[in-house]
Amino acid sequence: MFNILHLFIIYLDLTMFTPFHVSGCSLELLKPGEQGIVAVCKTQDENIRKKLILMGIKTGSSIILEQNFPSLIIKVDYISMTIEREIARAIYVRIIQ
């Protein structure tokens, strides 16, 4: 049975907090035209890390996937570039709806 404290907590949960949805994925899984903000770059490969730095891709960068086949073309801060799928797998983005 619920006591008054349990009912009050349920009431607070329903009235004080608005629902939200955060979605994210690897850059490789974006669909053409989708945009994301880089959340993290996950790789142990030093060569991939260097490539990401040279391309200017870092946490907080805005990325739009322009094309995913036959090659991945992205736009990072108004600059379009082609990237390898291995690099795209290492970039995790928060999708902007």
Image (cartoon, rainbow, N blue to C red):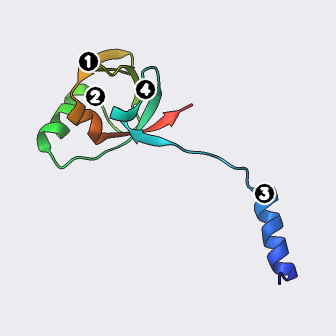
Kind of element beneath mark 3: helix
**92 lies left or right of 84:** right
Where does the C terminus fall, quadrant-wise? top right
Q: Which residue is mark 2?
A: 56
Say whether disc 3 or disc 2 marks the residue closer to the N-terminus: 3
Where does the N terminus fall, quadrant-wise? bottom right
As measured in the structure, the alpha-carbon distance from the residue carrying label 2 to the one carrying label 4 is 22 Å
Q: What residue sits 79% from the left and 68% below the top?
A: 10
Q: Give the amino acid type for the residue marked by disc 1 in the picture.
A: Pro
Kind of element beneath mark 4: loop
Q: Which residue is mark 4?
A: 31
Q: Residues within 10 Å of mark 1 (few under 14, many from 20)?
A: few
Q: Give the amino acid type for the residue marked by disc 3 in the picture.
A: Met
Q: Are marks 4 and 3 in contact (CB under 8 Å)?
A: no
Image depth: mark 2 or mark 4 in front: 4
Q: Would you identify the image quadrant in which residue 50 lies?
A: top left
Q: Which residue is mark 1?
A: 70
Q: Which residue is mark 3?
A: 16
Residue 15 in picture, x, y percent from top left: 82, 57
Above or below, comparing residue 2 to residue 95 in the picture: below
Q: Would you identify the image quadrant in which residue 77 lies?
A: top left
Image depth: mark 2 or mark 1 in front: 1
Above or below, comparing residue 36 to residue 12 in the picture: above
> Closest to the observer: 87 or 51?
87
Kind of element beneath mark 1: loop
